[in-house]
Every structure is written in structure tokens, then in C-alpha cells.
Amino acid sequence: MKLSLLALLVLVASVSAQEPAYGKRPTPQPAPQPADVCESPLKLHHPESKVLGKWAKYTGKPQTNRRGCRPKKNFIFMVSDGFGSTSETIAREFYQYAALGDDKKAIDDLESILPLDTLLVGAARTKSSSSWVTDSASAATALAAGKKTYNAAVGVDSKQIPVATVLEAAKHHGFVTGVVATSRATHATPAGWTAHVADRDSENHIAAQQIGDNPLGRSADLIFGGGKRHFIPKSVKGSKRDDERDLLKEAREKYSWKTIADSRDQLVAMPKTKAALPALGVFASSNLDYEIDRNVTAQPSLAEMADAALTILADASSECDSPGFFIMIEGSRIDHAAHTNDAATHIHEIWHTSMLCRLSSRLCKPTPTLVPFPPRITKRWCDGRLASRPVRGPDDPLVCVAPGPNRQGQGLIEKVGPMITGYKGDDVEAHIRKVCADFLGVSDVTAAEMKELVQGRADAIAKKYGDAYVFPMDIPLAKLMSVRALVGFTTNGHTAADVNVYAINAPGLRGHMDNTYLAKYSAEFIGVWASLPKLSKRLAGIDIGPQPKKKRSVDSSHNHH
């Protein structure tokens, strides 16, 4: 009787008391024992280090198994989109500063770390088949299916041939499966495991495939995220569909989804057992709000969604004949804040995604478990976007995210931009100064900065978007904050830098690797890799939607969100 759990966090994996099927250990070492399997390598090698802060803990029941039943294998693939080594650095530094009270104490602190710091096992290359610089869609396809493809492609190879994913193969082999994200459920990363389209912007196609409208039928037993707008008919306010299909109704009546939820209250009330499955939760019209802005009674947090999902899957996979469960969990909005160059929001998203490290390790405590973690292999500020901070003088602040009197519940750039562009009065400059002071804590806007802010507003209103990934209003607002925080960004897009791979006790997952290796590693671990080619053939004829646009719309890019 053996239980093992694999969780890929930011790039990925831990190991159970069993050797992974793919590859051999680089050096001989004893198999981890049940009591040790969830401990971090740093605890053994650097016992003086201490993890900062209090982090979410798994509150559900552990997966169980009875003597004579099928052994369990579980894989939790965690993705931190837009997260790189410099992102972890600034998050750690700011947390030290916040915890210790001043810059000097933070600089002198040599021992404090964040949860992910204990789990680093390697790095991954991220290029796509069409560019040295990947996007979220091609990166997700590499992680989910082990195939390189062009930027914008989801679940198809570079020739637009559909390729089956590890999640689909897991479902085919009897695993209970799930996807959790803070983006739209139809966004590139969650879609990478659950859909097959030529263009990531075909989110209406993605939604239909996710509920079961595809040759393989329903592959996900649980989907939690945002994106309700792609599941409701065109005639319903807020819909982004171009037809009258009601996918929430279809999900229940045609594809046997048992639980449909669209609020935090409904998530809380949902039975945390197999009785909830299949379960579809779309908790926002588009993406869920940033954690720094989230109405805690209206929308669930990533930790709340993940805890509920893991509890439900653990219960469902406790059935005697179940082989276990497979789930992908994404901290999606780390990336969005990086696109906007919003340092404070980026840091908060990192912190809350980091909570999942502890949550998952608590889940695996009772039994031998494999827990890996990888940030998604796209590039964001952190792996190249976020440049090193300039040299500071002794009186310079570590980072300035001064909230201002109305900061609670108001947000940073994503919330402040519309406050400025939506202003209908005559004194634009006075309004901008008031908004910056009240909501960003910036009361010393210079003449040059004001000129850029006014121009950004004008460009946004005129829809003069240029080639940036973000709205014109976001750019001067981000610069306003970054200059005062002494934080440098390299781009509003992606970079070609490698990303770190993190894991708990994952023999065989070490060193430098291509991102496609992570798909094979996860599939080999749960024993489904050999079935992917056959499943891919069954996908022939699936409607992969329209061809990619030569230039993506700013709405889709900003909401690339």
C-alpha cells in the first residue's frame, strides 16, 4: 500500500519513495522515507535558514487507501506564470523589509528565506518553435504535452496537429483530474492542459472543449478559475461569445457536470468530496482580481481554490480502484502584474502563490509523496524583465509601495488606470494628482511625469496602443511607481531567460532541462507517457478554431491577461 504525490511548483518536482519511471538518479541516494519525503533539502543542508512568514496550510482530509487496493500516485503541477529568479529576489527582499521594519535590518538578515528558496533543483529552457522568446500558450503546450510549438498555439504542434496532454492521458487511465488558475479558465496556461486551438485568443472554442465538446470528451473533473464571459450566451450582459451557446447549461445537461459555481460562497458551500465532481467554478467574468485588490467575500483566493480542489480530488481518488489524481494549479496573475511593470502587485501575487508550497507539502505529510513545483516557463519581468535594482544610498527605501489613505481594496495600476481614463471633468492634471496621491501614495508627480500621464490617458482614450502588451495608461503609471521604488524593468513583454525549477524530494529531476522534459517527467511518473501518441490520433478532426491573427488585439494582449 503506497501513496505518492508529485507537485510541480514553479518549475517543479518532489519525489516519493519510488524511483520515477523516466531517467535515473544522477547519483545514488537512499529513497526518502515517509517521514522525510515532504521535508525540504535546505532543512538538511542549511538548518540555520528560516522561512519567513505564515503560509497557508492544507485543511482537508488526506488521501486514504486500504490494504489490497490499487496503489496511488498523485501529481500536482504548479505553475507560477511570469515568475523568474529576480522575481523571487525582490519578493524575498521586500518580505524581509516588511518583517524586520527597516532597510538596514533587512540587508543584515542573511538567514531568512521564502518557501520556494528551499526547493530549487534546477533550471529550464523556454524557447518556442517560432521564437527564442516564448509566450504563455507555447510554454503551456510544452509543459502539458511535451511538444514545442509556435507562440499563440494551444495544444497543437508547430504544424497545427493536435497533441494530447498529460492531463488527458491521466483521465484516460482513470486518474481524477483538475485545473485551477487565477486567470480565466480559458486562458493560455489552463487551456494548455485542456484544449486544442490554433490561436490562444479562441477562448470560446476553448471553453466548449473544456466542458467536453471534443473527441476525447470531458478530460478535467474539476476546473476552477475565471472567464465566465466565455461560457454564457451572447445575449447575456458581459458575454464575450459570438453565439447563443450557454456552456454552463450544456455542461450540466449534456456533459454531466454536477456542480457549477460562480461565487466564493458557492465554493465554500460546495461539498469537499467526490460528490462535487465534476465541478466547474468560474468565479469572475474575466481574470480573478489581484490578491492585493480582491474582495475577500466575493472571490476566492488561489489558496482557497487549491485547498478545495485538493480536498475534493484526494477524496475522489481514495476509491479502491483509483490510481490517484493529477492537477495543474497556476498562479496566473504574477505574469499580468509583470506585464504592467507593477512591482507591488507582482510581489503580492508571488507571496500568495508561494502559500501553495506549504499547502501542498502539508497534504503530502501523512504518506510518501512526490511534490514538485515550477514557474511556468514563459518569461516575465523576473527572469529578465525585472532588472537588478540600481545602487541605493543609505537613506533610500528598499521599495516604495506606499498605499495611501484609500489603498485598501482599491488596487494599483489595474485599478488606477481606469480612474484616470474615465475622468470626464475639465481639470485632468488635478484629477491625476489626486488619484496618484490617494491610491498610489505618490504626491510629488513631476512636470515630466505629468506630461507622460496626460499623453498616456489621451492615447488610451484614442485607442492608440502601439506594440506594447499593455494599455498606454499603464506605462507611465508603472514608471511613476518603479522610479520611486528603485526597481528597473526591461520590457512589458517576455524575455528569453531560463526559469528556475523547484521541487521537494524529486530524484532524477535535477540540473538544466528543456521545458518539454517536464511533461515527460510528469507523464512517466504516473505511467501515462506511452498513451499520448494514441490519444493524439483520436484528436484528429477537432475544430482548432481560426488561424492566429498577425497582430493580437490590445484587449487580448492586455488581458493576456
Image (cartoon, helix red, strand yellow):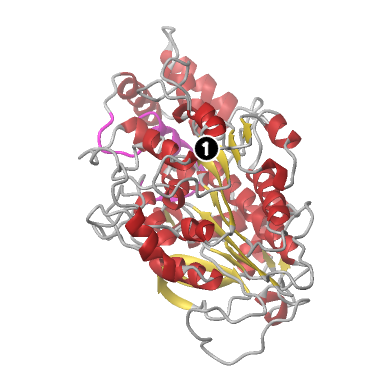
Q: Is residue 444 above or below residue 90?
A: above
Assess whether residue 365 is covered by the magenta stretch: no
Q: Position of residue 136 (x, y in %)?
A: 39, 50
Q: Quadrant of the N terminus?
A: bottom right
In the figure, 59 relative to 25: above or below? above
Can the viewer see residue 101?
no
Residue type at the position of mark 1: Tyr
Q: Which residue is mark 1?
A: 255
The percent position of residue 503, horizontal first and vertical second, equals 59, 69
Q: Which residues are magenta?
A: 465-491
In reply to whether residue 474 is colored magenta, the answer given is yes
Q: Check the image and report above or below for 175 versus 248.
A: below
Residue placed farthest to the bottom in the image? 28
In the shown orientation, is residue 217 left or right of residue 345? left
**Whole-percent x and y of residue 394?**
59, 56
Q: Residue at x 51, y 88 (%)?
A: 26
Label 1's element? loop
Query: Can I make out residue 179 in this image?
Result: yes
Which residue is rendered at x = 23% and y = 38% of the image?
A: 549
- The quadrant of the rendering that contains the C terminus is top left
Q: Residues within 10 Å of mark 1 (few under 14, many from 20)?
A: some
Where's residue 312, x and y in %?
Answer: 70, 49
Image vertical order of residue 416 relative to residue 162, above or below: above
